[in-house]
Image (spheres, grey):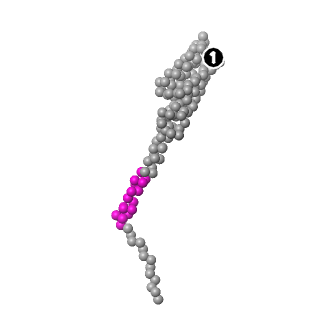
Amino acid sequence: MKEQSCPRRPRPRNRQTIRLADQGSAAAEVVILTPLLVLLALVLVIAGRLVDAAQVVDDAARTAVESAVIASTPQEAQVQAAATARYEIRHDGLRCTEYSMVTQVADFTAGGSVSVRIRCRLALVTLGIPGLPSSVPLSSRASATIEFYRELG
């Protein structure tokens, strides 16, 4: 009769052997994760720039309509709104490749309203990231009511 041999258990590895087997895994993790972290940082930069630019356009429209509402005449309202919007956009450092603004003053009477619409095309080329569109359109609209008890010119 043959003796049955028990399968041998693998010899337990000591700490030094385990450490040698794991050597280099940190470098591999860094090589894999670095491009992903750089891509995440670029996405955050682009998103931050777009959110900031949209906020600037919103603020410019709001400020422009506020300055138009206090004007005496519709013509003065258009001039003040245009000057205010231009100043706000330049002051905040937004560089629009295309810019347009329309001030609606058809209802420029006591109790009437004024509205301003601003359109701006923000250039993304300055970021130098391949695959991005060259520019993104932004627009904002704001309106305000003229006070009821106000004398207009």
One can see residue 43 in this view = yes
In-front residue for pair 111/84:
84
Q: Which residues are magenta?
A: 14-30
Q: Quadrant of residue 148?
A: top right
> Image height check: is 115 above or below 27?
above
Task: Specify the quadrant that holds the C terminus.
Answer: top right
Q: What residue is drawn where x is 42% and y is 54%? A: 28
Q: Quadrant of residue 24?
A: bottom left
- Give residue 47's position: percent from left, percent from top: 51, 37
| Residue 27 lies in the magenta stretch | yes
Q: What residue is drawn where x is 55% and y is 26%? A: 98
- Give residue 18's position: percent from left, percent from top: 38, 63
> Image height check: is 7 above or below 78?
below
Tell me the kind of residue under disc 1. Answer: Phe
Q: What residue is drawn where x is 61% and y is 15%? A: 74
Q: Which residue is mark 1?
A: 108
Spot the residue most to the left. Answer: 16
One can see residue 55 in this view = no
Q: What residue is drawn where x is 39% and y is 60%? A: 22
